[in-house]
Image: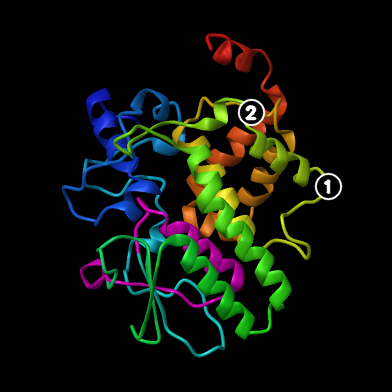
Amino acid sequence: ALKTSKENERFINLQLQLSHASESQPHTPNQNMRFINLAPLALASPAMAFSSSSTMTSIPSFIPTTTTTSRRTKTTSTSLSMTLTLYGSMGSRSPLVNWAANELDLPLTMGDLSENPHPFGQMPCLADDDGDCVVFESGAILNYLQSKADEKGIHGNARSAEVASWISWANASLDPICFLETPEGKVYDTGLKSPNRRIEKLDEILSDTTYLVPGGFSLADVAVSSYLLYVIQFFPNVEFHSRWPNVVRYMKDCAGRDGYGKAFGSNTQGFCLAKLEEMEKSGGGEKEKKLFGMF
């Protein structure tokens, strides 16, 4: 159940450090958030609700308990000998790294944040080979995980190159569309409320294929769909099915994967699937016309 509006607003402001804040600033208790107050939008999302015993510093109900009970718990297993340690939290882009590891069946251990080796103290950060190799920035980490999968013979070089291209596109082109920033670098809205040529092209591409790279689901889809799914969590009133129905179908396919649910939590997964189902049924329709009629 939701608590008072003041508590909700404080909680939402804390959680809205998701994605941007974690990689742009060191993680400290008094970290300034890059997101401005979006509480009126976010409160419409059941994924943002408090559990009955939540407080400002407690674990929100949508965080999966498997990632919070122990910082040193392995999330998966494999016969390949390696040590991959992820330094991150649910309030950063770290879950998309967990998702990638789940999909590739790579072992991943959550590290103690007080030992985070990131040169700027930010998240996420990945350490391999007992800290001898440190990789930061979510896109770089996904590419590194892809290289580990290549060592296992999961993909060939040509496919991995395509995956790397989409990962770069997600960070360089899709991110600025999904999250509009003020000159001070604070996110205030999403560009998915308005027509966009790049998203139109993405929708066109997805009209002929289930996933972005031939051969099935890949880390290209982890990178691209993560940004899109973040948008509907923090801007739950956004509607774009009438513009980009193939993108909505794609988001739903990605959010429905077991790896996504394990990384982001069943409540967040359920919320995203329900929201996308709602979009498909309504088709954007009259609600979208009213939303954009003022512009």
* 195 or 100: nearer the viewer: 195
Q: Is residue 87 left or right of residue 166?
A: left
Q: Residue at x 24, y 33 (%)?
A: 10
Residue 175, percent across and down?
50, 45
Residue 166 x %, y %: 62, 57
> Which three-letter amino acid code belongs to the residue tagged 2?
Phe
Furthest-front residue in view? 183
- Residue 23 appears left or right of 142: left
Could you tell me how many numbered marks the image carries? 2
Relative side of 227 to 153, left or right: left
Residue 273, horizontal then vertical, whole percent = 61, 40
Looking at the image, is 253 positioned above or below residue 72? above
Measure how far apart labels 2 and 1 are at the Cα level.
19 Å
The answer to which of 63 and 202 lies nearer the viewer is: 202
Nearer the observer, 271 or 37: 37
* Residue located at (53% from left, 61% from top): 99
Residue range of the region highlighted in magenta in the rendering: 88-116
Say which quadrant the N terminus sits in.
top left
Label number found at residue 240: 2
Q: Which residue is mark 1?
A: 208
Spot occupied by residue 115 in the image (x, y as percentages of width and height): 23, 73
